[in-house]
Image (cartoon, coloured by chain):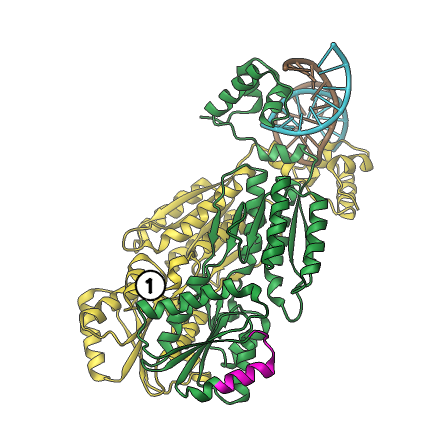
Chain colours: A green, B yellow, C cyan, D brown
DNA sequence: CTGAAAGCGCTTACAG
DNA sequence: CTGAAAGCGCTTACAG
């Protein structure tokens, strides 16, 4: 079955191409009868618009918006999804899509709100963002819903929203992967410490999933039978870390491994180095520069990577496919979990 | 500086678009004087053809050829690069590129030659292949060179050829990654066995690089100080494996880990299971189904993945970029090395 | 050696 | 409510 063109449909329906175009784009002003006829022919012949032609001729841009924390020295993590977004934007440039990037200061709810307002004012054809602040994000999704603007979550998601898609990691699985690594590296009766370094409570859901996955592993298959001790260090300040760790390590001399459920492992690594606890195994998340530093020095044994670049890249692609191509897209896309050691980091690209 | 069109060049040069097109495509029949003038204007204004328009109008297809071993039950490894090639082909379909896939029976030089002849007869605009048989591949590259057909290597490469690009893994790095994993999992004085399961000598270069990387790690940074014992099992037949391993493990009771430099680790895993040697750590390459089976059972501790899918995908993309877009492309692209354990395999996509 | 014209498949005013 | 026509930027014969 050769490709059917808009012209062919027009001929078969006995109308002009203009009319066909109108019904295909739902721009009204067409008799009901003509419309159904055309739609029928299109469907029967599985009409697929020629995107090349469309791109060439259409002068209207499709504007998407992204909203992420500003990547800073401290929070370089957000650099990679941003790169992915940029790359996708570049690839889709030929189809007249543009991505306007909005940023907010991390941990600043007010700024987040200001930026969402700006986006709503822009009235884009789609939005990519990470719902870091649950309450504010939920309010944002409500407004997007009202305007009929589709949105894709990256990094984490809000289940009780009407999101188009999610591209991100599976925290539970990430926790299990880490558990397997630690289980491999320690003896049967050694104890394990789980450290939650949450800056705000905001992240708790995410971290909990990782912790849950981690613990579940030992419930159903690990060799290790030691204690699993879990602590929380709400503000990841050095002195607080020192105090808490001093305490727990003193109480439990048998701790041979530490699992940190976030990307600030380097702070734990620093503590371990300072206190010459080099034989404690340390596993954490995200190959950001500070972590890579300690990975190379051997203080961190493994980092779990979660394809932040792909998260940004795929989110934009999904928006494109949904809005421009009207394809059905998969709602939840869990990216693979990468295990990174000091050797594999050399060629690592997230 | 706004985008300049072929029409603009024509105006500035005082000629017609047809003439401009002729010089831009080097189809001759243009006065030398006119030609230089046009080229000058194009260069000065940094003329970039509109690919969308070109794709829409051009009816000539661009045909690439790929040549890989037939993916079989036994050698499922070749399925993934093939998928990558297919996916890239699909994406480039709109630009009229077609990839004709050729296959040869693995380990059959004769068939390989037959297929290369067929490809030469097709006279494609580019070729993607893996130079598995050194001698035959070299002969093939010579003929391609003579016809001016660019070729991209995947999986391994022939240095002494005029290849356009290579997309694949870095065996040396892969070996080091494996070494780091084993070093992490065994005690300081345990011994390590390196097994080369080469079916033919063909693979020796590749395997040697992995072995070299593996050993180099222990030379310059590992904790482990035990013996590194290396054996070769030329035909990967079960009884031969049994015999050889029985022998070496009997001689060296202190072997606590085995590194297999190829994708047939599952054969070693089977041996270990049969002989109840479950506490020997086993690391090998490639998440093919048979290996995944033993990874899940715990007999294989880690698999190293090398993005075979990406190899196929990127190779075709590179050909496209070189031939159609005339972009400069990077000659050697080393893909990252993935560490896979029984937990991360769940979400793994190569 | 060169130009004028048609065409790729779609979209966009505009006229009726 | 509908059609005819121009145009997107390039390529392709064809005529001279």
Q: Quadrant of residue A200?
A: bottom right
Residue shown at 21% from the left, 84% from the top: B251
Question: Does residue B156 lie above or below B231 as drawn?
Answer: above
Report if residue A268 is visible in the image.
yes
For residue D10, above or below residue A346: above
Q: Chain of mark 1?
A: B
B13 relative to B343 in the view: left or right: right
Residue B117, above or below D2: below
Query: Toward the viewer: A326 or A46?
Result: A326
Range covered by the magenta-colored residues: A234-247
Instruction: Pick the residue in front: B234 or B278.
Output: B278
The answer to whether B136 is drawn above or below residue D13 in the figure is below
- Horizontal and vertical percent for residue B19? 73, 33
Residue at 33% across, 58% down: B288
- Dot 1 corresponds to which residue? B263
Residue A243 in the magenta stretch? The answer is yes
């Amino acid at each position: 079955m050769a490709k059917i063109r808009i012209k062919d449909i027009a001929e078969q329906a006995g109308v002009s191409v203009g009319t066909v175009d109108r019904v295909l784009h739902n721009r009204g002003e067409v008799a009901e009868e003509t419309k159904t006829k055309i739609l029928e022919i299109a469907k029967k012949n599985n009409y697929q618009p020629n995107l090349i032609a469309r791109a060439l001729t259409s002068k209207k841009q499709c504007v998407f918006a992204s909203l992420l924390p500003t990547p800073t020295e401290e929070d370089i993590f957000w650099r990679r999804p941003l790169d992915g977004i940029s790359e996708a934007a570049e690839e889709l440039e030929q189809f007249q899509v543009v991505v306007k990037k909005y940023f907010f200061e991390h941990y600043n709810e007010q700024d987040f709100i200001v930026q969402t307002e700006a986006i709503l004012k822009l009235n884009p054809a789609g939005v990519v963002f990470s719902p870091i602040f649950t309450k504010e994000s939920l309010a944002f999704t409500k407004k997007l819903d009202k305007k009929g603007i589709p949105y894709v979550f990256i990094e984490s998601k809000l289940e009780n929203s009407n999101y188009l898609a999610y591209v991100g990691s599976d925290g539970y699985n990430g926790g299990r992967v880490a558990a397997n690594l630690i289980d491999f590296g320690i003896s049967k009766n050694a104890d394990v410490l789980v450290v939650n370094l949450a800056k705000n409570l905001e992240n708790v859901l995410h971290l909990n999933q990782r912790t849950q996955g981690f613990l579940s592993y030992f419930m159903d298959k690990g060799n290790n039978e030691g204690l699993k001790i879990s602590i929380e260090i709400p503000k990841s300040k050095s002195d607080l870390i020192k105090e808490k760790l001093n305490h727990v390590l003193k109480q439990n001399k048998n701790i041979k491994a530490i699992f940190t459920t976030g990307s600030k492992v380097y702070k734990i690594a620093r503590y371990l180095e300072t206190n010459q606890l080099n034989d404690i195994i340390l596993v954490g998340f995200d190959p950001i520069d500070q972590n890579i530093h300690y990975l190379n020095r051997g203080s961190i044994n493994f980092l779990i990577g979660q394809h932040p670049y792909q998260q940004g890249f795929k989110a934009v692609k999904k928006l494109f496919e949904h809005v421009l191509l009207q394809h059905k897209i998969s709602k939840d896309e869990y990216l693979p979990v990468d295990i990174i050691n000091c050797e594999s980091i050399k060629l690592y690209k997230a």
